[in-house]
Amino acid sequence: MKKCFKILSPCGILGYGFPIESFLNGIKDQPHAIVVDAGSTDAGPHKLGANTAIVSRQACKKDLEYIITAGFENNIPVIIGSAGGSGGKAHVEWTLSIIEEIIAERKLKPLKQAVIWADIPKDVIRENMKQGKVVPLGKTVPVLTEKALEETTGVVAQMGIEPILEALENDAQLIICGRAYDPAPFAAVGVFHGFDRGIAYHLGKVLECGALCCEPGTTKDCMMGVLYEDCFEVYPTNPQRKCTTVSVAAHTFYEKDHPYILHGPGIVLNLENCEFSDAGSGRVRVSGSRISETAVYEIKLEGARKVAYRTFVVAGIRDPILIEKIEEVEELVKDSVIDQYPEIPRDQYEINFYNYGKNGVMGDLEPHNAAGHELGVVFEVIAGTQSQASALCSSVRSTFMHYGYEGRKSTAGNLAFPFAPSDVEFGAVYEFSVYHLMDTVNGKALFPIEYRMR
Amino acid sequence: MNRLVDLAKVLRSKNSGPFEITLDILFDNPASYRRVTESGIINMQKICQLYHLEPKDICNIVFFEKGLGIKITYNRPVSSGTSGDRDVYGAQQHAPLMDILIP
């Protein structure tokens, strides 16, 4: 076992970018592996449902060029978690096509790659549903039905460290994971080299966000994590940032439901008794991270389905008389459009107004629900087809533009459109239709590994 | 009396998965943390009132002294990114906390 093991995390999401000097500083410190998380459900259900990526191809390629070349040149493993953002088949293939392009363009020597798929066949889910082994993850998540599953584009599950460990045991130098629990690819490489699971998982939790746990924090910069027998240290490779005990401790709170209990695939991480100490030069040392294995190995399933289509308009309002009675006028506009379309059943569409500058962000929750001297209004129609959404939205726009509300003086028009055309066909609207835990026999069974020399 | 925003080092909101939003109130010194927690003002009733929630929609209110922070997690009325959602990342739902007055 090595005395210490260094993992370089270039950025919080593959494709978010990082300063080249930070990356080169990191390489100068001779990391034993480069691991990068590409995934998130933060951007909503559309990426998973429509099989699109969270970053542009160009942005992803730019980051990968540095990462893959550095891996090749230094003969260290590179692991990508949740390839393409959502980690489904299409997202992994998209990432593979970029990698192949880089290898060809840079004429890199072939090496052993492992692709770990995270798509869960619907038949497997159905079988588990029958046995009551698929449960909603959260009180507001509906019980999974056959209909919802059928309508879902594809289902992925978050892998833990087990399949990644197997790929490392088989000497893979470049590992492309489908959907993975964000910390897992980092933890796996540490565990493979004999380090404690709890410490490695906690380090993974910090590193998966890039330099977010620094001051100043960002997902768009590099972090180094160093595993020791009984603790880990983290530091930014950009001298303009530093880690403090408060910034690293605070990061354990980030985007999860509990401040110190974390549930992952087959594990529960308990960070209640962690000690954070200053190791000097912007480094922080963390010890006391504990892990336990769960009696049943549960994996988190994720899936999205198309629920409707949207057309929307962005407009500005500067007339104080209209701003004063904006909600009232919007209701009248809505009623008028409903009257104009008796042929479309009322329960098949929604007309919504968002008044930015008043309560656009918070809606009914807004404690300061008052407008300034101008308003940004976004209005949308959600309907069963794109053409219906657009037909209705164009009527909302024309009705709103010319609506003769009580007290109006600006009889030539109510809205300032910043763009022509004003109506934007958004396409499909998705929703998370699968967000459930499923029992499985172990961490490897549902994550097949494919090896290739490229 | 001080506003919570003037005592906290970090005041933020974010999705905790697509069906929940989590609010973090973090401090950079034990004195401010204790002043806020001991005031008893951050409680179920206050959060329900600010966020128009029923107690059953609040998953957790956890005070974590070691992390000098308070975490509040609640169920989203609409899941992230589908029709009717106003904040896909849940990143701008913290503002109502800012004006809470702490003795």
Image (spheres, grey):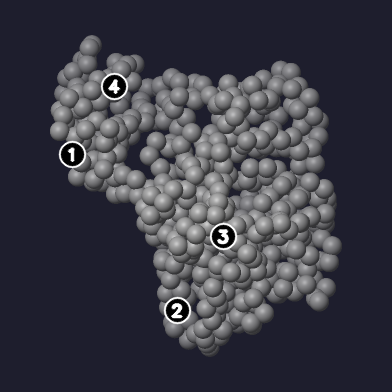
- Expressed as whole percent of the image width and height from the top left, the position of residue A174 reads 57, 77
In the rendered structure, the residue with mark 2 lies on which chain? A
Residue that label 1 marks: A391
- Expressed as whole percent of the image width and height from the top left, the position of residue B96 reads 57, 26
- The residue located at (57%, 42%) in the rendering is A138
Residue that label 3 marks: A158
Q: CA distance from mark 1 to mark 4?
A: 19 Å
Residue that label 2 marks: A100
Q: CA distance from mark 3 to mark 2?
A: 25 Å
- The residue located at (40%, 42%) in the rendering is B82
Nearer to me, A321 or B72: B72
Image disc number at residue A331: 4
Q: Are marks 1 and 4 on the same chain?
A: yes
- The residue located at (24%, 40%) in the rendering is A389
In this view, the mark in front (3 or 1): 3
Is A351 on the left or on the right of A283, as rendered?
left
